[in-house]
Amino acid sequence: MNTELSHIEVSGIFVEIRRKTIKNLHLGVYPPDGRVRVAAPSYLDDEAVRLAVISRLGWIRRQQQGFVRQARQSVREMVTGESHYFQGRRYRLNVVERPGNPRVRLINNSTLELQVRPDTGRAARQEMLDRWYRRQIKARIPELLATWEPVVGVKVSDCRIKRMKTRWGSCNIEARRVWLNLELAKKSPRCLEYILVHEMVHLLERHHTEHFRALMDHCMPDWRLRKDELNETPLAYDEWDY
């Protein structure tokens, strides 16, 4: 799909416009600073987009204020004493330097141990923890798909994990492939489940239409509560859509 990128300013708000071969205009406000992005049909000019933004200024400003209030983590230095999250819980990191194979493990309900070789740098420590996070999500996927495929009525051909800067998940409708953000390992299991179902429903309905919301209501009646829970948890320092 060819995309044309441009920008306008509306009432002091910088708006990014991505024109595509789509039928309807879609407006989003994204973390961490409430940037505004519009996906617009190719035939719509700037004035039509401007009017659409103006009609939703109140909603846009409320979303931006919510991001300002939302807690954020500081830059992770990967040293003992830092707070790290797993499945919605906060853990104190304990770095143990010793020879041998590195590993990550939960010691108890409050401690996440990172065992590394001496002189292992911050980036390598982060990569090790990210690999552990990836394994935790990957281990849950088969059970979640077995639970939700019959409910949603779709078959996912592939479900993969990657770090994403602007989205919690995405999907390729033609390939029936779902991508999940690595950051979901840090969130409540309910949030991971919500994003997976969200993307599975997109295999039936591409856009966030009334039909999409009706499908979500049918498949996961409490999805709005899960969405709120996800949006209230701390954002990673380098994290910025849902």
Image (cartoon, helix red, strand yellow):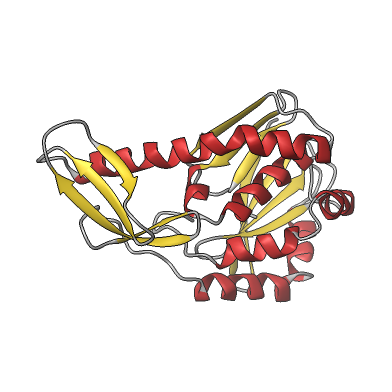
* Left or right: where 68 falls relative to 60: left
x then y, percent, for residue 130? 38, 41
| Front position in the image: 16 or 82 | 82
* Residue 63: percent from left, percent from top: 63, 70
- Where residue 233 sits in the image (x, y, percent)? 52, 65
**Can residue 35 be seen from the camera position used here?**
no
Q: Residue at x 21, y 55 (%)?
A: 79
Q: Front-most of 64 and 70? A: 70
Q: In this view, does 24 lie to the left or right of 81?
A: right
Q: How many labels does the image show?
A: 0
Residue at image location 67% in from the left, 57% down from the top? 28
Q: Nearer the viewer, residue 31 or 222?
A: 222
Q: In this view, does 98 lie above or below 39?
A: above
Q: Residue at x 15, y 31 (%)?
A: 100
Note whether 82 is above or below 26 in the view shown. below
Query: Does any portion of residue 107 appear in the rendered image?
Result: yes
Horizontal placement of 225 versus 165: left or right?
Answer: right
Q: In this view, does 222 lie above or below 133?
A: below
The image quadrant where one finds the N terminus is top right
Q: Quadrant of the C terminus?
A: bottom right
**Residue situated furthest front in the rendering:** 108
Residue 146 x %, y %: 71, 33
